[in-house]
Amino acid sequence: MRDRLADKRVQAVLKWGGRAVTVAILAYLIYRLGQLGWRDLWSALPRNPLFYLLFVAIYMAQPLAELWIYRQIWPLPAMAGMRALIKKRVFNEEMAGYSGEVYFFWWLRDSLSTSWSEAFRAVRDINILSSVAALTTAFGLLGVLTATGVLELERLFTNVGRAQVIVAGVVLVVVVAILARFRKYIFALPGGLSSRILGIHYLRLLVVNTLVLLQWMVGVPEIGVMTWLTYLCLLIILNRIPFLPSKDLFFLTLGIELSSTLGHATTAIAGMLLAASMLVRITNVVLFIVSHYGDQRWKAEAAARESADEAEQDAAPEVPAKTA
C-alpha cells in the first residue's frame, strides 16, 4: 500500500513538475522575444519571400537529420521522434547547451524503455561525432579562406602571432590523433555505425550551411559570398560552444562587430541577422507548444491502447486444461 502511495506521489510530482518546467520555458521564450524589441524586429524583416522559405528548410533540416541518425540505432516513431527532437533543439537554444541532450536522454528512457547506459552512450557518441564533423568543417573552411587570401587573420586577431596559430594547429592535430587512437575506449557505438552517423552529420552540415549561405545572400545581396563564408565559420564554431544559451543573439553581436571590422554594411547585416533571430524565437515558441500537446495526445492514445489490450485479455475466456 505504501509503495502504491509513493508511486502516485512521484507520478504527481513528475506530472506537475513537467508542467511547471513547460510554463517556465514558454515564459522565458516570450521574455526573450520582448527583449529583441517588437517594432525594431518588424521593421528589420527582409521583404523577399525566399528568405522565409529558406528559414523553414534550415530549421527543419536538423531534427530531420537527427531523426535519421537515431533511427540507425532504435526504431523511433517518426512523428513522436520529431516532436522530441524539436523540443531538444528548443532546450539547447533557449536554456543552455546540452540541456536538450538531457531531455532527449530521458525521453528515450520513457518512450523506448532503453537502459540508462545504452541511452547515455548513444547520445554521448552522437554528440561527439557531431562536434568532430562541425569543427573539422569550420577549421577546414578557415584554412581554405586563409590560404587563398580571402580571409586575413591579422585583421580579425591583431594580437595573435603566427607561432600561436601554429601551436593551436598542433594541439588540434594531437587531439584528433588521440581520439583516433583510443576510439574503442571512448566510443560505445560500433565502428561501421559510427562512420555512417559521421557521414550523416557531414551531409547535414553541407545541406544546412548551403541553405544558410543562400538565405544570407538573399537577405543582403550586396555582400559577396566570400564574406558570408567567413560568417559561416564563426557560426559553426559558435554552435559547438557548450552551455551557451541564446547562441543566435551572441552570433548577432559578433556579426555586427565582424561587419565593422571587415568594412561592410553593418546596418544591413544587423537587420538581416536580427530578423533571422526573431524567426528562431517565434518558431521555437510555436513548435514547442505544438510538440508538447502532441506528446500529451500521443501518451494518452498509447495509454488508451494499453488499457484496451488489458481489458481484451481480461475478457478472453480461459481455455480449460486437458485432463489425461
Image (spheres, helix red, strand yellow):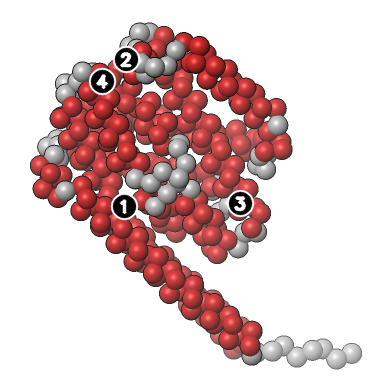
**Separation of disc 2 and disc 1 at Cα?**
36 Å
Check the picture and name the quadrant holding the C terminus.
bottom right
Numbered mark located on residue 120 in the image: 3
Mark 1 lies on residue: 284
Residue 66 shows in the view: yes
Three-letter code, disc 3 = Phe
From the image, state whether disc 1 or disc 4 is nearer to you.
4
Q: Disc 3 or 1, which lies upstream in sequence?
A: 3
From the image, state whether disc 2 or disc 1 is nearer to you.
2
SS class, disc 3: helix
Q: Residue furthest front?
A: 159
Three-letter code, disc 2 = Arg
Q: Indicate the position of residue 185 as horizontal and vertical percent values.
A: 71, 38
Numbered mark located on residue 255 in the image: none
SS class, disc 1: helix
**Separation of disc 4 and disc 3 at Cα?**
43 Å
Three-letter code, disc 4 = Thr
Numbered mark located on residue 155 in the image: 2
Q: Are marks 4 and 2 in contact (CB under 8 Å)?
A: yes
Q: Are marks 4 and 3 in contact (CB under 8 Å)?
A: no
Q: Quadrant of residue 40?
A: top left
Q: Disc 4 or 3, which lies upstream in sequence?
A: 3
Is the residue 154 above or below the residue 230 in the image?
A: above
Mark 4 lies on residue: 261
**Separation of disc 4 and disc 2 at Cα?**
7 Å
Task: Tell me which residue sits at (67%, 38%) in the image.
Answer: 186
Three-letter code, disc 1 = Asn
Q: How many marks?
A: 4
